[in-house]
Image (spheres, grey):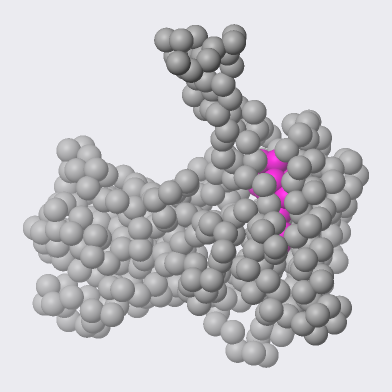
Amino acid sequence: MSEETGPLADYMKRLGENARAAARAMGAAAPADKKAALRAAAKEIAAHKDDILTANAGDLAAAAREARPPAFIDRMALDDARIDGICAALDDIAALDDPVGGIVKAWTRPNGLKIERVRTPIGVVAVIYESRPNVTVDAAAIAVMAGNAVILRGGSECLATSKALFDGFARGMRACGLPPHAAQFVETPDRAAVGAILAGLDGNVDLVIPRGGKSLVARVQAEARAPVLSHLDGICHVYLDAQADTDKATAVAVNAKMRRPGVCGAAETLLIDRAALAALWPPVARALRAAGCELRGDAAVRALDPDVAPATEEDFHTEYLAPILSVAAVDGVDGAIAHIARYSSGHTESIVTENREAAARFIAGVDSAIVMHNASTQFADGGEFGLGAEIGIATGRLHARGPVGVEELTTYKNVVRGDGQIRP
């Protein structure tokens, strides 16, 4: 593939035109055909596991030579279990109800007009992502199940792995007779391809979903000419209330931070009710340290535990994506809500408490895409929500919030049925 501007522009233009044509066909695709294609794709990927792992080994070796951060390499890495998980996600998505044609709401007007809001595909979805090869399959499957066409642009650091996974997905699509351009993979590493997608491919892109680092998401949000569904940061909080169960508080805090520190649902700040700080902090701190977590605390935390490093204002604004945790004492639920309103990115927050009234106040007062009670923030995941998989977490306030699954990649149209009514 030539990376010259002219040939690249022609290539991207064809992708857009082909996607638009495929989207029209996908809108009428039978649910059984979509489900069969996803199951066939799962079998193809499983059958070519060795080829995928070989491609991934090459990408990982290149990332190591470039001294990529450990969290970045962890997101890139595949093994037998992760590929099995990709295949299982395909089967899970295939088992979901097809949302297309579903009636969101129906009502009848006094003049006899019957009105329905009916789910329809969005059209052409472009997904731009970095370092997570599984997104190739998750995004393609979710888009196809929702009746869309999808254009996938993976990061150059994982291009070989993503292409190997996509090839398996495409074989499943072809085997079941779905439009061959319903899912397309941008094969060039040329960064200008991203610019072409953001420019809209001559109006053929209906929605852009970025999934990657802050610079990528910020660029997409700033430059895209189509609507964007995304989150910029995952600055997630866990609040330990004065009436938290100590064992639950410890388990949730450790899991939320340390299960996989590099995912967007990992907790970055731990808040503790000042009234219970002396009781809760010692066991929680011991467990976090034992798990290998670096702790940075405010003055109240450091007065109780001088071994904690001082936390700066910048720490509370930071998505570490690493085994580092900021800790602050707050004045009860209201203090936690105020801290979260100031520092949160609107992703995921959790309260640990046995007091239902406190939990209800927290849930009502925190305006994030996902709010939890007595659960780890690492459950901020489409698979854990029963969506089969997700393309990402949306933290905006329009169209979709939280995990973006099949239903979130649909919109609706209003269908009006009458019997000759005219408007006076």
Task: Give whichever of 285, 82 is nearer the camera.
Answer: 82
Q: Is residue 123 something one can see in this rendering?
A: yes
Task: Give whichever of 182, 384 is nearer the camera.
Answer: 182
Q: Which region of the structure is painted magenta?
A: 139-152
Q: Is residue 255 something one can see in this rendering?
A: no
Of all residues shown, which one is farthest toward the front?
424
Give the quadrant of the N terminus: bottom right
Name the residue rendered at 14%, 62% in the picture. 330
Quadrant in the rendering for residue 150: bottom right
Task: Give whichever of 101, 74 is nearer the camera.
Answer: 101
Name the residue rendered at 48%, 17% in the picture. 423
Quadrant in the rendering for residue 309: bottom left
Whole-percent x and y of residue 68? Answer: 59, 84
- Left/right of residue 94 with respect to residue 119 in the rendered view: right
In the image, residue 424 sits, relative to residue 82, either above or below, namely above
Whole-percent x and y of residue 260? Answer: 49, 65
In the image, residue 13 sits, relative to residue 389, either above or below, namely below
Name the residue rendered at 53%, 15% in the picture. 422
- Left/right of residue 378 with respect to residue 88 in the rendered view: left
Give the quadrant of the C terminus: top left
In the image, residue 198 sits, relative to residue 348, either above or below, namely below
Whole-percent x and y of residue 404? Answer: 54, 49
Whole-percent x and y of residue 71? Answer: 53, 75
Quadrant in the rendering for residue 97: top right
